[in-house]
Amino acid sequence: MSSKRQQTMAKMMREQALRERRAKKQEKKEAARSAKAGETPLASAPDDDQAAAD
């Protein structure tokens, strides 16, 4: 009988931290790319908040 070993909490937390770091890095890259192109980043566009409120 081969049963799967349960993943430890420590490993799950390490993997979650890694995913978060990669996501932040990607956001940073996209912000730099849009700034270089002369655009404003999508995350800080106040117009979207105004449209949602109306």
Image (spheres, helix red, strand yellow):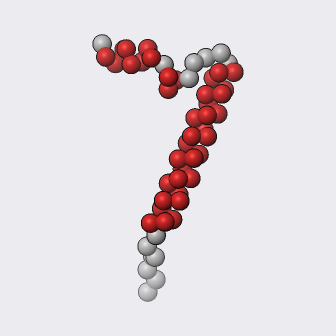
Question: Can you give x and y, in whole percent of width and height, for residue 28 in the image?
Answer: 61, 34
**The C terminus: image quadrant:** top left
Question: Can you give x and y, in whole percent of width and height, for residue 43 in the image?
Answer: 50, 26
For residue 38, side relative to residue 19 (left or right):
right
Question: Can you give x and y, in whole percent of width and height, for residue 24 in the image?
Answer: 57, 40
For residue 50, side relative to residue 11 (left or right):
left
Quadrant of the image occupied by residue 38: top right
Residue 43 versus residue 10 in the image, above or below: above
Q: In the orientation shown, which residue stands out farthest toward the right?
A: 36
> 21 or 37, which lies in front?
21
**The N terminus: image quadrant:** bottom left
Q: Residue at x 53, y 47 (%)?
A: 20
Question: Can you give x and y, in whole percent of width and height, for residue 36 in the image?
Answer: 69, 21
Q: Residue at x 65, y 21 (%)?
A: 35
Q: Residue at x 50, y 54 (%)?
A: 16
Residue 37 versus residue 17 in the image, above or below: above
> 43 or 6, which lies in front?
43
Q: In the orientation shown, which residue stands out farthest toward the bottom?
A: 1
